[in-house]
Amino acid sequence: MFRLIDSHCHLDAPELNGAGAQLLPDARQQGIDSFIIPGVRVADWFQLLSFAEQESGVWAAPGLHPAYAGQWSTMAGEQLRELTAHPRVVAIGEIGLDGVAGPPLERQEEVLRAQLQIALEADLPVLLHGRKATGRLLEILREYKIGERIGGIWHGFSGSMQVAEELVRLELKIGVGPILLRESARKLPAAVRMLPAAALVLETDLPDMADQPEVLVTVAEMVAELRGWTLEKTARITTENVCRLFGKRF
């Protein structure tokens, strides 16, 4: 039986009405045995940690989504710094820049830089959100040498091959999710075919991009088809990539 890791899913999302844990048994039967849940809002962090403590194979990545950068404060920074010591915390996320939602990009950048600094101090990788601000986010990641120093995943990738190649040069992983399953998808399938195998990790971004964790298997099947791999090989490679990034916890 193959083994898959969902590198980005919001099992604690309010839209699930507390039913995230009920989705896990079926997912595990399909070979998905580990789940990384990023933070979104400051108020979610402790609930996120509680969820990870209660469920085996669930790991937390607390952080402040750029759309909610207005919630950042000195106290929030202190709380996040304290949470990095928790044994279920494996990353800081989801952090980045969003040119569509949230406060002005200047404020988002301040908050991003503060969270990157916390991640560097804690030696934790980052889960990255970039929308309509790709160039600036790449500049900041390059400035801090994030890929080289702590690593990270560009979540929900849908960009060009040129951007994908730059992420590889920056030593970052690329999160491949349900966007790959869209009939209209063109750039992402091309990138998946051509990227180094070591750059690929899988995600669902549940509940935004998927309604159940098992969609990860369908994404893996599509990656396998595009690469000419078996499903088992796809699972092995993407799982090893996650384990290499996050350490031996998985």
Image: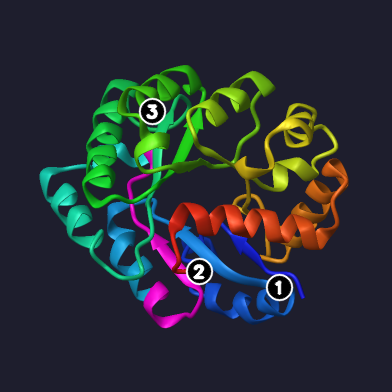
Q: Is residue 114 above or below residue 30?
A: above
Question: Which SS class for mark 3?
Answer: helix
Question: In the rendered image, which quarter contains the N terminus?
Answer: bottom right
Marks 1/3: CA–CA distance: 33 Å
Looking at the image, is mark 1 or mark 3 earlier in the sequence? 1
Question: Which SS class for mark 1?
Answer: loop
The residue beneath circle 3 is: 141
Marks 3/2: CA–CA distance: 26 Å
Q: Is residue 186 magenta?
A: no
Tell me residue 64's x, y (percent): 33, 46
Decide if residue 149 is on the left or right side of residue 214.
left
| Residue 206 visible in the snapshot | no
Q: Quadrant of residue 3?
A: bottom right
Marks 2/1: CA–CA distance: 14 Å
The residue beneath circle 2 is: 250
Q: Is residue 149 above or below residue 235?
A: above
Decide if residue 28 is on the left or right side of residue 35.
right
Looking at the image, is mark 2 or mark 1 earlier in the sequence? 1
Question: Which SS class for mark 2?
Answer: loop
Q: Identify the magenta region.
A: 51-66
Whether label 1 touches label 3, CB < 8 Å? no
Q: Quadrant of residue 52?
A: bottom left
The residue beneath circle 1 is: 31
Tell me residue 106's x, y (percent): 28, 21
Q: Residue at x 85, y 37 (%)?
A: 183
Q: Amino acid at mark 2?
A: Phe
Q: Which mark is residue 192?
A: none
In this rendering, which labeled residue sits more in front, label 2 or label 1? Answer: 2
Decide if residue 26 is on the left or right side of residue 171.
right
Tell me residue 203's x, y (percent): 62, 53
Neighbours of disc 1 within 10 Å: few (<14), some (14-19), many (20+) = some
Q: Amino acid at mark 1?
A: Gly
